[in-house]
Image: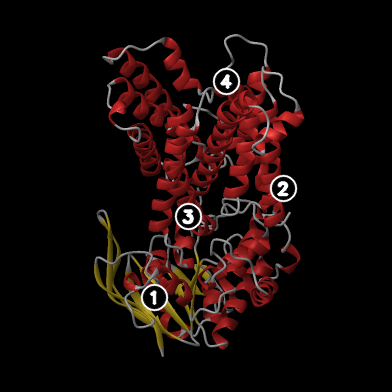
């Protein structure tokens, strides 16, 4: 499929998923009322439910998914590895660590931007470590193992930070960070993450040409005229901004960043640069659908969206790992 | 006209001197073969010439400039390079892989698409490398030799003044080995400067205007095939002797055990 129609189709799928999400909920609101509310009509309580509860939550799911999808696509291109993903590589876990430290040690209340910035710093550190250790020169296996180690380490430090923190916390807070949730998110949450998403997305797209050239290895890419220093910087910062802001809003949600690029890759002729936007759109739609499933599932308390993502994503990850050609190069 | 040159170029890799005061220049229209045993410094010399390896001493020139001072896109327009390690991380189609050779001509831009001129150049390069029939195939579905031909086409596609190939014939069947040297030497007839690192002395002697012999990082000989591959050089560097029929024989065969 050529690029523009693919992006349009995935964009429509995302809008459709968002609309279904807005239709779904415990309050009995009809299709007609929902449409009216979206267009600014309907009664005050209905408008409130749609605009202040359902839409921000659905949009948060979409934007978090899209960030993770784009971040996964960029990391895969940079590390030349179809198993790279912010969750698998520990980038999300390091982001969560950054956020948890500032929240539970009381810094976050100083300014609302401190949490996303700390989460992004955690992400930058982890991507830099991965790149320094792996960076396309080591095999897939080694890179994934480094990521697994980083992920476990960050998870342990997150638990430790909460234990040492002067501020009170509950076990459910820890679970929220480590398993991810988009419940009760507001326009304010979206507003604080948005600038980072926009800049991260732009950097990711600027890295795209270099990622394309990197398909042929670093030497060939340099000889072709790719500016690899710039590509690395943009890809690392872009992936870190996207992931960090997503984690600051929703905690750690795994596997979206690996499944979405894998599904759309054949549709963009395996081009690592063209992969970014379709991956973002597909991942956004997927996470909105996952959130609908979470809300409809008859569990109390509500299932975490990160759990739903992992229930579907982890087996998919295993399947991709088992069927990837040239594994361990 | 000299397209690229090394002057007293030295590179140290840890304790080892990979390149030891090497000087040579390559001009447009010229085909040079670089030969030497494993570890002689051939790949390092090629990479130094196009600015991929930094010199510890001496000087590299590419179209009159220091390669390290050039912007990446300028360098991409001056030299095409076929590395020894021919990798494609993603299973893109052979056509898309070859099109990457035109990266510095805008194919790499964020939302770029191939225009008709680019398409023509890609088809032409694929045909030169006898890979036209592979154009639509995903590269990971190709055999090692077929992939090597697609990568060769990628190196041929751009109209750069300098074309550098590191063991282009490796992993090819005999017919395509012969054709590869011929195809590369023909590029020189269109006015490009062509530099090929190879282990195939016979092919080097047949197709190259000049041969550079490297051993232990040093340039041992530089001249037309008959001069550079003298009896002395053959014996000293390679442990070989010409067999008088265009081939070579080992001077001291490995002892039979």
Cα distance, mark 4 to mark 3?
31 Å
- The percent position of residue A20, horizontal first and vertical second, equals 70, 31
Side of B145 where A239 appears, left or right: left
Q: Look at 24% across and 54% down and name the residue there.
A: B15
Residue B233 circle label: 1
> Taking A72 as reference, is A209 above or below it?
below
Q: Quadrant of residue A26?
A: top right
Cα distance, mark 1 to mark 2?
66 Å
Between A62 and A82, which is closer to the camera in this rendering?
A: A62
For discs 4 and 2, the disc positioned in front in the rendered view: 2
Between B138 and B43, which is closer to the camera in this rendering?
A: B138
Please say whether residue B10 is visible from this viewpoint: yes
For discs 1 and 2, the disc positioned in front in the rendered view: 2
**Mark 4 and mark 2, same subunit?**
yes
Mark 4 chain: A
Q: Can you identify the residue that label 2 sits on?
A: A9
Cα distance, mark 3 to mark 2?
24 Å
Q: How many marks?
A: 4
Label 2 near label 3: C-beta < 8 Å?
no
Residue A41 circle label: none
Mark 3 chain: A
Q: Look at 57% across and 48% down and name the residue there.
A: A276
- The percent position of residue A126, horizontal first and vertical second, equals 38, 36
Please say whether residue A89 is visible from this viewpoint: no
Q: Can you identify the residue that label 4 sits on?
A: A307
Q: Would you call the spot at circle 3 few (<14 residues within 10 Å), some (14-19), or many (20 or more)? A: many
Of mark 4 and mark 2, the one earlier in the sequence is 2
For discs 4 and 1, the disc positioned in front in the rendered view: 4
- Secondary structure, mark 4, is helix
Cα distance, mark 4 to mark 1?
69 Å
Between A325 and A211, which is closer to the camera in this rendering?
A: A211
Q: Quadrant of the N terminus of chain A?
A: bottom right
């Amino acid at each position: 499929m050529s690029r523009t129609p693919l992006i349009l189709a995935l964009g429509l799928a995302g809008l459709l998923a968002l609309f279904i999400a807005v239709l779904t909920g415990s309050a009995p609101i009809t299709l007609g009322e929902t449409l009216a509310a979206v267009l600014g009509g309907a009664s005050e309580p209905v408008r409130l439910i749609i605009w202040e509860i359902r839409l921000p939550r659905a949009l948060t799911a979409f934007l978090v998914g899209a960030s993770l999808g784009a971040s996964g696509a960029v990391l895969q291109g940079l590390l030349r590895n179809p198993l790279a993903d912010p969750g698998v590589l520990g980038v999300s876990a390091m982001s969560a660590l950054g956020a948890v430290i500032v929240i539970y040690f009381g810094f976050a209340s100083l300014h609302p931007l401190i949490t996303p910035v700390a989460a992004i710093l955690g992400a930058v550190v982890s991507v830099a470590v991965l790149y320094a250790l792996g960076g396309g020169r080591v095999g897939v296996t080694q890179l994934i193992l480094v990521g697994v180690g980083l992920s476990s380490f960050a998870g342990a430090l997150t638990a430790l930070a909460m234990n040492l923190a002067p501020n009170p916390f509950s076990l459910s807070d820890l679970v929220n960070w480590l398993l991810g949730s988009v419940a009760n998110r507001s326009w304010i949450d979206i507003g604080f993450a948005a600038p980072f998403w926009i800049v991260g997305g732009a950097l990711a797209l600027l890295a795209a040409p270099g990622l394309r050239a990197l398909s042929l290895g670093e030497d060939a890419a340099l000889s072709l005229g790719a500016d690899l220093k710039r590509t690395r910087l943009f890809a690392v910062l872009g992936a870190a901004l996207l992931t960090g802001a997503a984690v600051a809003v929703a905690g750690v949600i795994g596997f979206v960043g690996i499944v979405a690029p894998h599904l759309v890759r054949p549709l963009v002729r395996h081009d690592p640069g063209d992969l970014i936007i379709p991956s973002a759109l597909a991942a956004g739609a997927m996470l909105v659908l996952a959130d609908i499933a979470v809300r409809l599932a008859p569990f109390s308390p509500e299932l975490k969206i990160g759990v739903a993502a992992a229930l579907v994503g982890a087996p998919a990850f295993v399947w991709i790992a088992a069927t990837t050609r040239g594994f361990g190069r | 006209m000299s397209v690229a040159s090394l002057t007293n170029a030295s590179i140290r890799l840890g304790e080892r001197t990979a390149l030891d005061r090497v000087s040579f220049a390559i001009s447009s229209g010229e085909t040079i073969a670089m030969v030497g045993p494993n570890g002689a410094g051939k790949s390092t010399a090629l990479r130094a010439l196009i600015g991929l390896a930094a010199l510890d001493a001496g000087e590299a020139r590419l179209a009159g400039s220091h390669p390290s001072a050039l912007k990446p896109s300028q360098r991409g327009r001056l030299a095409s390079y076929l590395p020894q390690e021919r990798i494609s991380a993603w299973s893109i189609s052979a056509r898309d892989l070859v099109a990457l050779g035109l990266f510095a001509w805008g194919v790499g831009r964020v939302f770029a698409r191939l225009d008709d001129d680019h398409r023509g150049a890609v088809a032409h390069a694929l045909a030169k490398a006898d890979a036209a029939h592979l154009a639509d195939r995903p590269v990971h579905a190709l055999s090692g030799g077929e992939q090597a031909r697609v990568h060769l086409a990628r190196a041929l596609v751009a109209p750069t003044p300098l074309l550098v190939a590191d063991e282009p014939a490796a992993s090819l069947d005999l017919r395509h080995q012969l054709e590869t040297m011929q195809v590369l030497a023909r590029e020189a007839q269109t006015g490009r400067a062509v530099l090929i690192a190879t282990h195939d002395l016979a092919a080097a002697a047949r197709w190259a205007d000049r041969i550079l012999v490297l051993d232990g990082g040093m340039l041992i000989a530089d001249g037309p095939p008959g001069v550079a591959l003298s009896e002395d050089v053959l014996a000293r560097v390679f442990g070989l002797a010409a067999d008088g029929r265009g081939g070579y024989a080992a001077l001291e065969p490995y002892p039979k055990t």
